[in-house]
Amino acid sequence: MTLRRVLLAVVTVGILVILGGYALMWRPAIAPVTTSAAVNSDRKAIDHGAELASIGNCADCHTSENGPAYAGGRPIPTPFGTIYASNLTPDGETGIGSWSEEAFKRAMREGVDREGEQLYPAFPYDHFTHATDADIHAIYAFLMSKPAVRNVVPANQLDFPFSFRPIVAGWKLLFLHRDGLEPDSTKSAEWNRGRYLVEGLGHCGSCHTPRNALGGEKKGSAYAGGAAEGWNAPPLNASLVTAHKWTVDQLAEYLSTGWHRLHGAAAGPMADVAKNLGRASQDDVRAIATYIASLSPGTEAAKAAVPVGGKVLKDQPADVVAIYDGACARCHNDRQDVGPSQAISLSYSTAVQQPKSANAVRVVMHGIEAYRTGGGPYMPAFAGILTDKQIASVVQYVRARYTDQPQWTDVNSQIAKARQEGAQP
């Protein structure tokens, strides 16, 4: 074969590969509709959609700080750059007011917008793809009932090649599995409902499952723990270490209020989840708790060798003990009294038990503000009061006093990261 024919063959194969890839990623635009045509006056569907949107935590991702609800613009940090959440209000130009229900369903199931562009999987359509037609209809009806807000969302800040949207089609070939969730006849209706919500609209695995280098969930390590906005999302499976084993009742209370006496308060991104679940159907919240509890049936609580009051530590620096006594012990007393802040003994804290210090560091630095306007657990932020050295010393003191776990090795790096991230709302 001559060199010319070899080159021709290579070029031909290259063209075919490009055309094949284009065929995989190309999706046609769906004709726009008028906002009035998209409005649904079915109050039952709208109310149900509001509850489902709460389970999906839609408002928190699609609302910028101090911005109108669902109007988009919130920066979503990813390992590949920053993605700005889209405007979900029915504005015809900057929102989804021109989207038909068919276009909305395609976005939820396939990750493709009305105009045919690939959507980045920061929008968790790899979970939403499991939602039923009826539930997608209800969410669409709810969003279209919201006030239209004109808000031009900033452009994503992604480096090449991640800024080239067609590559998302390749990601989907690897990680978007559109198989339905068939009910398990050996389980209860409540368990099956919980599984549907956790695996689908609740997209719990988006945070609580580790991800690979391409940003896909490691399905072989489902619910083994992940990360969200700098915080550790603890395991939901049998590898979870807590001072007390979670029961269904405890989980249901924690998920709907953000707090439980034996486990403490939800903080960071989980605080937003709990606030939203407080607005959802409590039957659905209990179903979620039932399914999650089943993921760790054999989990044992952390060894009860450490008493509620913690261990007696000798030869501790006086300045560290003074900081703990003055800044921590006033609320986190060891008499199991729960005051207005709803602080509990740190012997119950999951963050203190975790193998990494990210959550303990961030809750000390950023505090817990999420519930303050509506009542609930509260903790002041100490990032502006304590030095980095003092923060490191006090979290290591708490770790030593209230667990039998080894001292953390990542405290200084986590403090530096938390300083860069700024406070969580």
Image: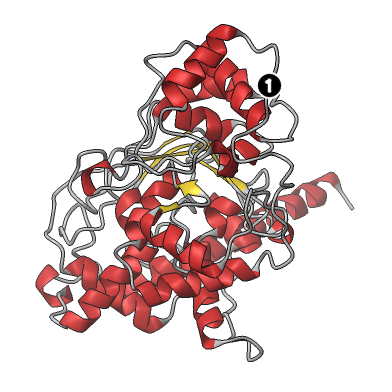
Q: Secondary structure at mark 1?
A: loop
Q: Nearer the viewer, residue 187 or 37?
A: 187
Residue 314 appears in the figure: yes
Q: Residue at x 41, y 74 (%)?
A: 284
Q: Amino acid at mark 1?
A: Leu
Q: Nearer the viewer, residue 145 or 408?
A: 408
* Left or right of 127 in this view: 70: left
**Residue 157's spot in the image, x, y percent?**
41, 34
How many C-alpha atoms fall within 10 Å of the one at disc 1: few (<14), some, or many (≥20)?
few
Q: Residue at x 26, y 47 (%)?
A: 375
**Residue 395's spot in the image, x, y percent?**
57, 24
* Residue for badge 1: 313
Q: Nearer the viewer, residue 91 or 15?
A: 91
Q: Residue at x 87, y 49 (%)?
A: 2
Question: In the picture, which quadrant includes the C terminus?
Answer: top left
Q: Residue at x 41, y 19 (%)?
A: 383
